[in-house]
């Protein structure tokens, strides 16, 4: 019976781990881009900030997000 051949933890999960890391990375960066876009358009259309003020705020958010969300060197070796 095929059910008896199963051994827990015996499968190579390198591809699943790589796919999970890719999806989480894409989610993280897409979320940052969406947040910057929402900030830009909210400031542009709902306040008197204007295009330049909205763009500056969005770029500041992007820069802070990149600094905070990038992969840390100590975390890269922990996988």
Image (cartoon, rainbow, N blue to C red):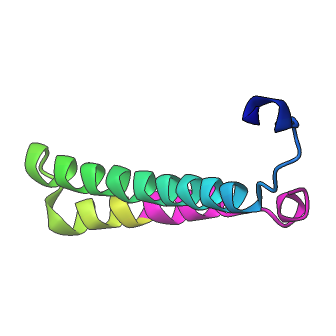
Q: Hey, which residue is sitting farthest front in the picture?
A: 1
Q: Is residue 27 left or right of residue 18?
A: left
Q: Position of residue 5 (x, y in %)?
A: 84, 38
In reply to whether residue 67 is colored magenta, the answer given is: yes
User: Residue drawn 57% across and 64% down?
Assistant: 66
Task: Please tell me in which quadrant of the rendered image residue 37 appears.
Answer: bottom left
Q: Look at the image and give the residue range highlighted in magenta.
A: 60-79
Q: Position of residue 14 (x, y in %)?
A: 77, 61
Foreground pick, 55 / 78: 78
Q: Is residue 34 left or right of residue 28?
A: left
Q: Is residue 68 visible?
A: no
In reply to whether residue 70 is colored magenta, the answer given is: yes
Q: Quadrant of the N terminus?
A: top right
Q: Is residue 48 visible?
A: yes
Q: Quadrant of the C terminus?
A: bottom right
Measured along the vertical axis of the image, is residue 58 above or below residue 5?
Answer: below
Q: Is residue 75 left or right of residue 61?
A: right
Q: Is residue 15 left or right of residue 5?
A: left
User: Residue drawn 50% across and 60% down?
Assistant: 26
User: Residue drawn 57% across and 59% down?
Assistant: 25
Q: How many marks?
A: 0
Q: Position of residue 45 (x, y in %)?
A: 9, 50
User: Residue drawn 39% across and 67% down?
Assistant: 59
């Amino acid at each position: 019976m095929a059910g008896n051949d199963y051994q827990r933890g015996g499968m190579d999960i390198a591809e699943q781990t790589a796919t999970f890391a890719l999806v989480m990375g894409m989610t993280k960066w897409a979320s940052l881009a969406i947040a910057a876009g929402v900030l830009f358009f909210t400031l542009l259309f709902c306040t008197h900030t204007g295009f330049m003020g909205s763009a500056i705020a969005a770029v500041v958010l992007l820069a802070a997000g990149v600094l905070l969300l990038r992969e840390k060197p100590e975390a890269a070796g922990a996988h």
